[in-house]
Image: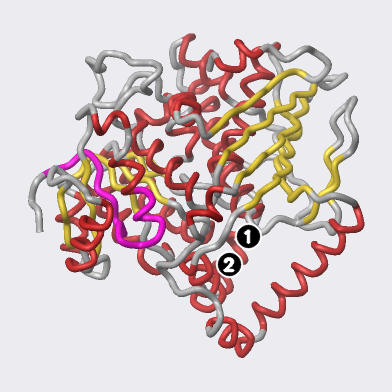
Amino acid sequence: MSTTSSDIVVFGATGFTGRLITRYLVSHPQFTQGSFSFAIAARSQSKLHALVQELKLPSSINIVQVDVTDFKSVEAAVQRARVVINTIGPYWRWGTPVVKACARNGVHYVDLTGESVWIKDIVNEFDYLATKTGAIIVPSCGYDSVPSDVSAYLSNKTLKAHGDYDVATSISGQIVRGGISGGTLNTIFTILEDVPQDKLRESARDYSLSPVRGEVFPAFRLLYEQVIPGETSVPGSFFLMAPGNTKLVQRTFGLLELQTITATQSGSSAEATKIARRERYGSSFAYEEFLIMSSRFSAIAFSTMFMTGFLLLARLSPLRWLLKKFVPAPGSGPSEESMEKGFFEIINHTTSTSTPPVHVKTVFKGDRDPGYALTAIMISESALSLLLPPISKPAPPSKTSSLPEGLPTLAKKGGILTPMTAFGDVLITRLLDTGRFSYESHIVGEPSNSERRKDI
């Protein structure tokens, strides 16, 4: 086991998503230029060596044997990193020791969780500690929940560039094609079987992850609809990922709102207060998202079938036992060919609180399977956002911080953050630089400006 320090350590590198992340990092232009180092970590030494052979990894990549059930092992591995990428789930079962070690040692952390109940636990346990050590802890840095966070963030930014407006509603419709891995299914079963019901109920409430409460939409409907002025109404159904994504976006809102309240009440500089007010979404903010469908009938039918199936799965343990016999095992996932055909598109419609309201439309797209191929990119670029400036926007090292220039104010304070409160424009630029992502954001009724869209 290596004792050499690395900029990044990938926990769970031998799992399906871990292998994709390792493959992405080793081919990254900033790695080939020697700008960062990384290590691969897992419990099985033999699987780690097999991964080295499979991907033909160079000898500069360190190998770390780590057992997440042994806190001393976890802390020893964490202490040799600047950023930990943690892919070992279910996080409810295995994630807490890794977050604890990072928070204690001031090491930054990103993961792929969509488990709001677990995020609530780590916020309660480690947010204060992380602000004291400077650790930036960012859950949900993959398809859960970067696209949702980015779309709401970009719409707010476009709205603020148009004038002094606050957000009233922010509604995202998603179109997605992608596969599912055994690890994801295992997480769903774990949440249904292992998490206490009182914790599930508490975490399911709107703003359960947010320090400030905003407005809400109805929790569940059979039919959703997105009505953008001048366009045909878009119908949609309930979306499996919507509850977790919504909680994450609500935390972004709450952290930015609290930043504004604190800046105003604590007598911060005029510039700091101005920045906080520009970044905030506004106290009347309400967010929801849905899965775009071809018709109202298909939307209602899908919502009905999904909720019926989910309730049966939640209440009938024999049904879960049977399904486990047929679903893919953890460590498996979609084929390369299937991932090549995947994509996502998220269309966000944001309105202002003003009368009449200003409407913003933002479209954020990703080309490849969002849950795996693009998730590997999103979490890798999230980790790199804490180490290096984007390739397209090189900058000299900061003289006052170990963090790259351009990160949001909240990142410099540490804590349990979200992708947009931790990385902001730096991550968006990094994603655009990969060539796999694109976005447009404009005021409805005004011609979109491609140059303005790119200048984030």
> In the rendered image, which residue does mark 1 sit on?
204
Magenta stretch, residue numbers: 5-21
In the image, what residue occupies the spot 31% across and 14% down?
395
**Could you classify mark 2 by the number of other residues whose Cα lies within 10 Å: few (under 14), some (14-19), or many (20 or more)?**
some
Q: Is residue 144 visible in this depiction of the protein? A: no
Q: For this rendering, which residue is in front, 83 or 61?
A: 61
The picture places residue 84, in percent across and down from the top left corner, at: 29, 47
- Whether 171 is drawn above or below 375: the answer is above
Q: Quadrant of residue 169?
A: top right
Three-letter residue code for mark 1: Ala
Give the left or right position of residue 314, taking residue 137 as reference: right
The secondary structure type at the circle numbered 1 is helix
Residue placed farthest to the bottom in the image? 318
Q: Report how far apart the C-alphas of labels 1 and 2 lie in the structure.
A: 6 Å
Q: Is residue 274 visible in this depiction of the protein? A: yes
Question: Is the residue under label 2 in contact with that under label 1 (CB below 8 Å)?
Answer: yes
Q: How is the image coloured?
A: secondary structure
In the image, what residue occupies the spot 47% across and 24% down?
429
Three-letter residue code for mark 2: Leu
The picture places residue 340, in percent across and down from the top left corner, at: 54, 48
The numbered disc on residue 373 is: none
> In the rendered image, which residue does mark 2 sit on?
200
